[in-house]
Image (cartoon, rainbow, N blue to C red):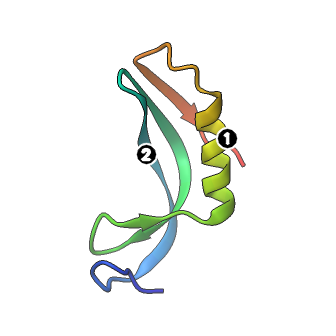
Amino acid sequence: MKCGVCGGELSKMTTDLPFKVSDTSILILKGLPVIQCAKCPDYLMEDDVLHRVDDILAKVEGGTELEIVRYTA
C-alpha cells in the first residue's frame, strides 16, 4: 500500500501517540497499532483500532494533565 501524502510504502507497526483530550489534558496511547509511512510522518489506523481509540478517549475523565495508557484491543 502507498502513502497518500508522499507515495512512500506503508507498513504495519506499533507506536506511541498523544491525543489532546481537553484544553489541559493529554492522553498518550502506548503500543498503538498503526500503518506508518516509511518516508513521512503520515499514518493510518484500521477501523477497529480507531473505534477502540474512540472508546478509550471517551472514558478519560480529563482531570490529570498527562495520562499514559497502554492500548489493548
With 17 as the anchor, is 29 left or right in this view? Answer: right
Q: Nearer the viewer, residue 34 or 26?
A: 26
How far from the left and from the top, in percent, is residue 61?
A: 58, 20
Report, in whole angstroms, how far the alpha carbon at label 1 lies from the one at label 2: 16 Å
Q: Residues within 10 Å of mark 2 (few under 14, many from 20)?
A: few
Residue that lies at the very extreme toward the front in this rendered image: 23
Q: Disc 1 vs disc 2: which is toward the camera?
A: 1
Pointer 2 residue: 17
How far from the left and from the top, in percent, is residue 30?
A: 51, 41
Q: Secondary structure at mark 2?
A: strand
Give the quadrant of residue 50. Answer: bottom right
**Mark 1: amino acid:** Asp
| Residue at left offset 55%, top offset 50% | 32
Q: Residues within 10 Å of mark 1 (few under 14, many from 20)?
A: few
Pointer 1 residue: 55
Rendered position, 59 above or below 42: above
Give the quadrant of residue 38. Answer: bottom left
How far from the left and from the top, in percent, is residue 41?
A: 30, 63
Rendered position, 32 above or below 36: above
**Mark 2: amino acid:** Leu
Give the quadrant of residue 25. Answer: top left
| Residue at left offset 37%, top offset 81% | 4
